[in-house]
Image: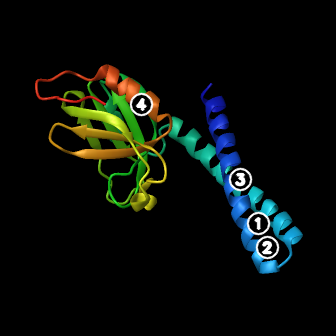
Amino acid sequence: MIMNKNLKIAIRAFLYFAVISSSLYCIVMTLVSADISKGVIGGVLFGIIISMSLSVFLFIGLTLFEKKLFFYSNMPNLLQSKNVYLEGIAGNATRGRIKYGGLFLTEDSVIFIPHRFAIKPKTVDFPLEKIRIVNRAGISFLKSFSGGLRGRLLLETIDGDRYEFSVWEIDKWIKEIGERLIPSPSSSQRG
């Protein structure tokens, strides 16, 4: 089941990568070679090779994520006595550079754990009673290098902290978190 889901994601990524990279390489190779047929053939071949490589890399990464091999040894301590309702690969797109890891929804919090190779890793734990807004952050060209060219999951706390996470299936995350929010007197708006 999980392997099948990972394979579907890798195939979707391959198609996306193939269309984008083949188009770009076709244009570049046509301009360089000054021959449209050479540019198109070379661009498509190069685009498929690059796309295949990236898709295989993604598939391996998704499989390793499922086995929890990318995380620090503190992960079991953080999630030891908690029920995990939803988990997925995520990127903390809050600052200028995206940091990848895993996002976990438990019965009382949303936890982001960076992968073991992250520079200056910082685990972020959002207690559900402190989450004020759960919504979708729109596309932002100013955040191009931190996942801003796609929709992101937006979490805002009652303390005014605002975090954006690049995740698959954003609407599912919004729904699942929204269903588990713990009402508090100071929470005013829920996405």
Secondary-structure class at tag 3 = helix
Closer to the chain start, of discs 4 and 2, is 2
- Label 3 Cα neighbours within 10 Å, binned few <14 / some 14-19 / many ≥20: some
The circle drawn on residue 173 is 4
Cα gap from disc 4 to disc 3, whole angstroms? 28 Å
Cα gap from disc 2 to disc 3, whole angstroms? 16 Å
Secondary-structure class at tag 1 = helix
Cα gap from disc 4 to disc 2, whole angstroms? 43 Å
Q: Amino acid at mark 4?
A: Trp
Closer to the chain start, of discs 1 and 4, is 1
Indicate the quadrant where residue 84 lies: top left
At 44% from the left and 59% from the top, the residue drawn is: 141
Q: Is residue 28 visible?
A: yes
Position in image of residue 16 (x %, y %): 66, 48
Position in image of residue 13 (x %, y %): 64, 45
Whether the residues at callouts 1 and 4 have beta carbons within 8 Å, the answer is no
Q: Amino acid at mark 2?
A: Thr
Name the residue that disc number 1 marks: 26
Closer to the chain start, of discs 2 and 3, is 3
Name the residue that disc number 3 marks: 19
Secondary-structure class at tag 4 = helix
Position in image of residue 48 (x %, y %): 76, 56
Whether the residues at callouts 1 and 2 have beta carbons within 8 Å, the answer is yes
